[in-house]
Image (cartoon, grey):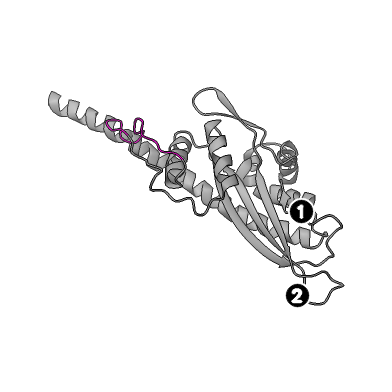
Amino acid sequence: MRSDSGQAMVETALTLPMVVFLMLGTLQLFLVTQGRILAQLAAYRATRVASTNQGSCKRMLDAALVTVMPAVDPFLGRPGASPGAKLAAAYAKRRNNRYADAVSDGGAAVTYSGAVVWIDRTFVGFGFDQPGELLRLESRLVFWFPMRIPFANWVLARMYLAHAGLESYTAQNPLMMTQKANWGAAGGTNANLDASIRAELQARVARGEYVFPIHTTFTMRMMTPLAAGGGSSACQ
């Protein structure tokens, strides 16, 4: 009986990290799915507002930030003001398109300070006073979704870096404490990540900012003439 009890304790100790990760990881993946849906909506709204406002970068960023705010800051669960007032307060903290959050992950607080969204624009076609194909706006949005579920965020970040071919991880396996991890970057693929995203992702993870780059696109015909000097590609 005593040996059986000891065996059960050992088995529990070996499997507990995996069980905890499955629960927390599932929750984190549900939140990433929510972030992806909001990113798709943000790309649409940003493109729509630019189409009707002469391609304004500022309006694009504002529209995108307000749309993804529920995934950035769970403001609706707070007591007090109306939902609109809570949204305005959450947006006001990040209106310069920078995170302003101190997150504690079982240790010292980490300040998330990077950009919330990146937007790249391409204008294709001709202006309203020129013959030919009508001018359209092609937008690409990258939402730096914050992963804030303790333990799951660290593990998923390391897994993603290895899967994307960015960084290997061969230290203690957090899911099986009796083994060394073998999450190699050599066999990964980074075909869907351009150089700027790869560099930004590695830099943020190195700072302890666990984010997942969700990128999506949307295209719409311009409904107003493009403003003078408004053809720059990046809105950040």
Q: Main secondary structure of the magenta part?
A: loop
Question: Which stretch is magenta?
Answer: 167-180
Label 2 Cα crowd, 10 Å radius (few <14 / some 14-19 / many 20+): few
For the N terminus, give its image quadrant: top left
Q: Position of residue 129 (x, y in %)?
A: 87, 72
Q: Is residue 202 left or right of residue 163?
A: right
Residue with the most extreme bottom position: 131
| 219 to 27, vertically: above or below | below
- Circle 2 is placed at which residue position? 133
Counting residues from the start of the chain, the first of labels 1 and 2 encountered is 2
Q: Residue at x 71, y 60 (%)?
A: 122
| 212 to 205, vertically: above or below | below
Kind of residue at badge 2: Glu
Residue 32 or residue 90, whichever sits in front: 32
Q: Secondary structure at mark 2?
A: loop
- Circle 1 is placed at which residue position? 232
For the C terminus, give its image quadrant: top right
Label 1 Cα crowd, 10 Å radius (few <14 / some 14-19 / many 20+): few
